[in-house]
Amino acid sequence: MIKQSWHFLGLPAQTNESLWIFNLCICLAHFIIVIVVLLDGSDVSLPVTTSYIAWKEINATGHHGDSCRQGNCYLETEFAKLTVLPDISLAGLLIWSHILSLSWPFLVLFDGPAERFYYRQRKRGRNTFRWVEYALSSPLMIVVIAAILGQADFCVLTLLAISTSTLMVLGYLTEVHIKMTPPITHITGWLLFSLIWAVITFTFVLGLNRSVTPPPPEVLAVIYPTYFTMLAFFGSFGVIQAVHVATDMKEKRLLDENAPLKYNAVEMWYAILSLSSKIALSILLYLLVRTRDKVLQIEFIK
């Protein structure tokens, strides 16, 4: 029997059967969102650009190649479109994030090695499948978020994606070493999370304050909710793990044969957050596209 007094942030311990049904519902929800996004066709294409330092002549009177030696050059920041790479489809990134999110829950619905590995992992208080999916889907989401908030530099977006994937690896290592004191991997994860969002916040604030023409109110009505909603969702994953680390999962009774299922409630919280954050981001991108089409046909970059 499951000890009914066992709860994790309000969710009681779950049976394997109830978690199977929950995983099935999660798969269906992600699949429905993918179909809706595909049928709607709303998208924003972000050109692949980056900035660099260009050496330029003050005037063209100097000898070729000797202008700087003659004090006839200066430095200027320029932007280049990397034409060898296709434009980034923000809706495409979101679709793939949903597909990744439904892939492993779908895989463990059926009897086989994957399902057995999944159950063994949960009894040990971890889920390798979930963290692998996060390491692949979260970088896609962070690129969409950063792009909506004004970041267009391909190199910065790449580094944000890699950093976010690394953050997910730290989350997995925290579950593996749940009894580590102090929880170094978890603390490091919060530091990396702060750096990632510091870059996004800097771009967000700079774009709003340095623009010669402020964005239309209709656009701000989408951009502000994107920032605060996604920051809250991404931070909530860390909060769930902080509670996970600080309380129940440090107790050896988790491995007791009669009550290994409390981790199922942890699983459910992560799944709910993952689904909710991806749906929210899909809706916000949809609203941004509709606003763009309504207000001056604006784009991120001409």
Image: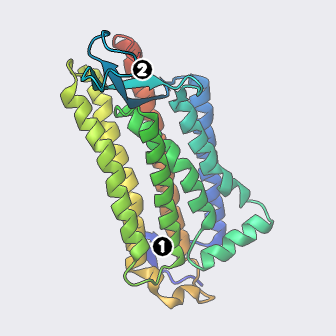
- Above or below — where is 265 with respect to 44? below
Regarding residue 9, the answer to whether it shows in the image is: no
Which badge, 2 or 1, comes first in the chain's sequence? 1
What residue lies at 68% left-to-right and 73% top-to-bottom? 119
How many C-alpha atoms fall within 10 Å of the one at disc 2: few (<14), some, or many (≥20)? some
SS at badge 1 = helix
Q: Give residue 140's position: percent from left, percent from top.
A: 52, 43
Q: How is the image coloured?
A: rainbow
On screen, residue 222 versus residue 154, left or right, reads: left
Q: Residue 52 sits in which quadrant?
A: top left
Identify the disc placed on residue 290.
Answer: 2
Q: Residue 127 sits in which quadrant?
A: bottom right
- Above or below — where is 274 with respect to 223? below
Residue located farthest toward the right when viewing the structure as drawn: 112
Q: Nearer the viewer, residue 244 or 172?
A: 172
Q: Quadrant of the C terminus?
A: top left
Q: Quadrant of the N terminus?
A: bottom right
What residue lies at 33% left-to-right and 54% top-to-bottom? 195
> According to the image, label 1 marks what residue?
174
On screen, residue 72 versus residue 156, left or right, reads: left
Q: Amino acid at mark 2?
A: Arg
- Above or below — where is 245 with respect to 168? below
Q: Amino acid at mark 1?
A: Thr
